[in-house]
Image (cartoon, coloured by chain):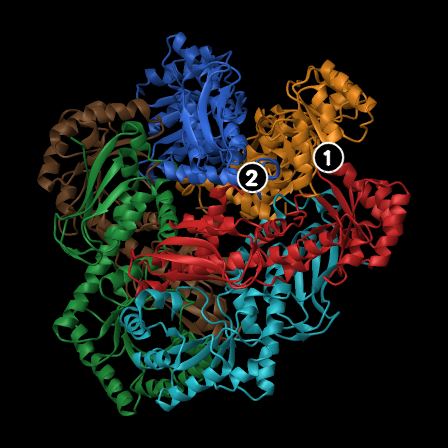
Chain colours: A cyan, B red, C green, D brown, E blue, F orange
């Protein structure tokens, strides 16, 4: 996102956290008192949100400098960012900055872990996010997935055609749905459809879907469906599996030669990476 | 929060997710097509966010009815809410509604688990949240903690005086800090201070702190400090421990006869409760 | 767009127009004075913006009923919408309502005229909009194009990859650009690239572009390029021409068997359709 | 408008266009890559919106310099503005900047054309805009009219008393309406009333209207009414004609010795001036 | 202001007051508990803000009914509005509702007192407000002045030309300033200029000012200036005095036969009218 | 409040006042014309709002320097702030800046007067504000009270538990109410309760209230109640009186040995301090 627009988005998050002002700092910290601070990891992981942290700090008038790049592997105790400026201001942004950085780094760390597993096994399957995220944080969560080496998948409902079980409940069949979408959607949009069995997968491919999502397939079922589709000559349609993927069964799914494996837990059940900010008095 | 103000907050979250409109529903779902939908649990837990889900659904013109109360224990497959109305609208709110409900229920479930553990052991110690949360979601996260039987702790920086390590790095000692706070803060605010050893805990109590946070104390250290403080006659000061608390060591901390145990993971590392929405055609 | 979100968007447009209140109506019109009003065409055309007009009127507490459907051909003097309610309120929304309806109908009318020309000539080529629009009105302008039978093309910069002359000025060649995009963009996005000659068109197709935009090609050049691409076996890549298309040369372009003809003037140089609102006293 | 308030208004327009970020530039353009760009005319006209273009560019951190003044006549290929800075940022603002500049310049060009026609004929009649504009763009449209040498007329409903046909439909006669307005409106507001015949024009003048709008009068009717009013001694009341004015009949209307001729098409049917932005790599 | 736009403005004021929710009501008041409440005067005065109070109450889902009209004289203990609905909601809006109603009624009361004084003395001079008000409350303050029988004067900087001492410090003389304004401002705007002596008043009138403000004139000076201007034939120019007017010297100023007396204290030093809200349990 | 967040709040207030731009300055003042200006007192008092004035001026691109500190006693004619920069910008912010500074200084002046009275009498009782303020200005009003040496009391409904008459009307007795609050509110909140007689005061203290508000007690009643409470051993509960306090009876109340005296008039009936801004041409 353009830096100045990102600033406004971050300031809105900060404003909510600050309320009518930091009564503690106002009560006990002198104003216009310059200090330095270090943002440091308290465990190993993959960092994400450096741009957000710098932009937020700068947006409130602080100086901030990054010592790592987005997506870099970081170690416990490693200094990520140094900040200098007014103490009251640093205290006011501390928690918002850390909350975003820890969440994004937690997401990137988990995404990178899955991706490494695939890479080590020599697989080219992509790891993708879903829209199962925390409300209001889709942009940041998806960006963290991308930084961790995953694919963000669609950002919003206006991005892409994705026909799911609830659409099909209304429309009837996969074929009707895909044809309807092709007829009425803009040519600029890809069309994806969720299927629950291989017959529907074949219908979706015939009807011209760009992407087919195998919903809650076991690795074996997924494998069988991929084989059928490729055998039927559908070599360009992208195949995605979603539902029931864990770190443990990831490689089994990957062996089905799917193009994409999407994992809701990457964004709906985030384990924040432990990162802290320590103020040091200037000597 | 007042229902109409909550509506505006929820519509803002929805607007972000919808972008310029749900291109899928617009392409394939007829307009003004009435359907019913059920929001149901896909695992056991404690539900939170029912008010938010109803308010969001109603804010966009749907009818919605809850079948459970906030904080109730729910079972896999249990129907939580039934919704009826325009299909395109239900599809537009589905993900925002579920994302919030799943997150809040995940938080309530985890809070309730800790609280039950304490209760079963006959302890009256409170479980509290921290401000380590997802940016923009503090209100909802804290509310979920309260629904799960925990204490939300302060909401914003403007709520309460809480003097932490970074304030002390600037101010010098605990005693100075508490005295300064008492002199300049409003009499309407409680004053809490973080300490790292029992000498400071005693100083904080003498200086008149309302609450003392034992930062990263082991259960044994905490116990020793509590004993010293009570022996010194500080019976009214509330004692909180924060840092390093897990489900495993919770009871050990509780045995230290602390008033409050605060747990950052309740809100910074949420495991969303699995909840889904299924549309059914009216018969 | 979801109706309640559309309401908020329309109320923001209204608020800007109203300023601190309609001083004229306040000075001369009694409050709580019920009247009826008719919104009627003053020339022939194709109507668009009925949903917006109804939603705006209802959002401020008026009753409104449409007598035509979106995209319908309308005649001079035809009544499009009837409104009833408080006179001061009708006067306050009159101009915002008409300005939007007239603009959208002007766009739909012009789009439909081009599309009819193609249809009458038996062509299946699509007419598409560009992002050359009025700031802040992209959503409404694109929707009007769709209602007029055109393709809205991408809505925002976040929708789709579209590599244009200015990207190429930085990146060097078309091939590098498309490959880079394929490697880094999400699989959910289509990739379009602008080319200025047929060599680049072939490179773009080989590199895997989903759509190729022939920028400022003459009909003859376009025809030659289409032939070369199809002969080279690129049957699935969509071909779009943009620049220099007018109502006069439209069919010549269409004969080149392009998939899409995009026309900036549809949204950057709109001729508003003449529509008025007349208040009638209830008898 | 004050520059910092204008910045916020322009950033809001930009934010809408950018959505969740420019996925194309993000995918293919390196970050922190400095380039130069030229904004140049692609046809002759009168430029307007230079302040807006500079302010927007600067608001997102670019350097921008104008080579022409607001209202200057410009030639095809003339460079209007040079911009330098981060390539991704230039690409993100390009379309919003050009859309506003092209629209405002289109309005100024058309206004100046009418005004020149009057000036060349030795007339002092003013050309004025109406509120028939694009929703949300009234401020910019009116400013462009002023830059083109026209009068913006009222900006908002809160500016001035303007009693139109719909008010009169409710109130009965012109005389009652003007008297009511004089009695209840602030002395700081001018009072204008629309009339459809010369009897009403005389009543309006007697009742004390500051301005009389001759609604849809032919040049001959307008002339006759002006003569009657002036003969009756109403020398100070301003006379405006509105409706049916075209470039062709403009001088006929002007010969009626009206003070103001207002033309809705100036803002409701804008032909954007063709202006483009080209990036050049720094050498 | 249109009711739905007013609702949004009032809800924004409420949201600021409520913060993250009324912790007291949430802690001690049952939810969905229906009560009645009376808003009653605790001293005599003139009421203003009834529309705001009703609109705010209704905007949050309460029923509210007025027992007095805007501008009515009210007595101590008189019930102004009855409200019924959810207790938590009434408690949440109570203070915002009363603060606005008390302020507006205080302004109307004071305005009416001055106006009555003039009326009783048989004077037709108008009492007007200035822009010396509380930030953000200009709309409500001016409306209260109008309800109290005064003239709101201009609302915003975009309403009218008012050339004051600081403009003249830059421009040099009154004559230049007025001529410049007449040449460049829209014909829809009145032009007012502040003068400090009668020579300037005559120049301003000659230059064509619509209104002349006698700044900080004594009643005697004002009288002399009025006489000179009228004698010089300037019968239509409106004459306003501003500065140093008190309830005590009001009639002396009025005797100078001024058209308008403006009084900053009406809005910058408001004495709120005492109004309270009492909840009664339904029987 | 953090400076950048304060900037946004102040710019919003400015935007409301400016509307679509300062038509006067635009018509008569050259653009990019540098001037200096002095903000000076026109009467004696205590200044507050210097931070707001500087922040607003700087937020719109002006240079501004303070010559007094917040809370300082100032004399008639004393220069408080000097500003330099673009003349149109200074004229655009002049009124918003002065309105806020005058209001805040008026509040601080009145607060300081009461506080001085207590101090001179050797009393340590605190003067506190209430929430009876002007809508939207609570933050600034409370800050001004603090600068004047008073206590801001709670800022918002989310700050503190304060059980008032209307809560008690629903809940029944003081005792139930306080117990309910203690059971359900967060341990981070103080609990205050309003009482109307000494029996209730004793119950409130027994039930564990942190603060007791004696509502509309006479000085004699207050004294008696304080004595009873202290005699009963309630030495830590804070005692506040509210209602009926004037400058005249202040010392009588203070003699009752209350901890806090709260005065609604400090913020609901503000007398603005007279402060003006004069532009001087640079020599």
Residue B160: in sight, yes or no? yes
Q: Kindly indicate the quadrant of the structure image that contains residue D109.
A: bottom left
Q: Is residue B103 above or below residue F158?
A: below
Nearer to me, D269 or C123: C123
Nearer to me, D15 or A211: A211
Nearer to me, B206 or F149: B206
> Could you tell me which residue is drawn at 61 percent across and 23 percent down?
F265
Labels 2 & 1 near each other (Cβ < 8 A): no
User: Where residue E247 sits: x, y (%)?
Assistant: 50, 14
Q: Chain of mark 1?
A: B
Tell which residue pokes out farthest to the top in this image: E121
Query: What residue is disc 2 on?
Result: E18
| Residue C278 left/right relative to E191 | left
Mark 2, Cα crowd under 10 Å, few <14 / some 14-19 / many 20+, is many
Q: How many angstroms separate mark 2 from mark 1 (CA)?
A: 20 Å
> Could you tell me which residue is drawn at 69 percent across and 61 percent down?
A83
| Residue A163 left/right relative to A269 | left
Query: What residue is disc 1 on?
Result: B187
Q: Residue F64 — which label? A: none
Q: Are marks 2 and 1 on the same chain?
A: no
Mark 1, Cα crowd under 10 Å, few <14 / some 14-19 / many 20+, is many
Q: How many marks?
A: 2
């Amino acid at each position: 996102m353009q830096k100045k627009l990102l600033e406004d988005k971050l300031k809105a998050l900060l404003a909510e956290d600050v309320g009518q002002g930091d009564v503690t700092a106002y009560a006990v910290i002198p104003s216009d008192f310059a200090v330095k601070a270090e943002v440091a990891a308290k465990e190993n992981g993959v960092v994400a949100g450096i741009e957000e942290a710098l932009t937020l700090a700068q947006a409130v008038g602080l100086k901030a400098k990054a010592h790592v790049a987005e997506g870099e592997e970081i170690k416990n105790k490693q200094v990520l960012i140094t900040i200098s400026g007014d103490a009251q201001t640093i205290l006011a942004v501390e928690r918002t900055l850390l909350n975003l950085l820890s969440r994004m780094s937690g997401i990137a760390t988990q995404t990178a872990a899955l991706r490494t597993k695939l890479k080590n096994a020599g697989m080219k399957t992509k790891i993708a996010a879903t829209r199962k995220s925390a409300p209001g944080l889709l942009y940041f969560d998806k960006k963290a997935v991308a930084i961790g080496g995953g694919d963000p998948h669609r950002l919003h409902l206006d991005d892409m055609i994705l026909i799911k079980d609830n659409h099909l409940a209304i429309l009837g069949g996969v074929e009707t749905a895909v044809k309807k979408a092709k007829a009425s959607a803009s040519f600029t949009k890809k069309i994806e459809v969720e299927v629950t069995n291989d017959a529907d997968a074949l219908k979706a491919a015939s009807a011209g879907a760009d992407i087919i999502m195998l919903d809650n397939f076991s690795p074996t079922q997924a494998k069988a469906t991929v084989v059928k589709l490729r055998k039927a000559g559908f070599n360009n349609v992208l195949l995605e599996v979603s539902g029931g993927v864990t770190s443990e069964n990831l490689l089994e799914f990957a062996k089905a030669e799917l193009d994409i494996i999407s994992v809701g837990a990457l964004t709906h059940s985030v384990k924040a990476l432990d990162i802290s900010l320590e103020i040091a008095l200037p000597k």
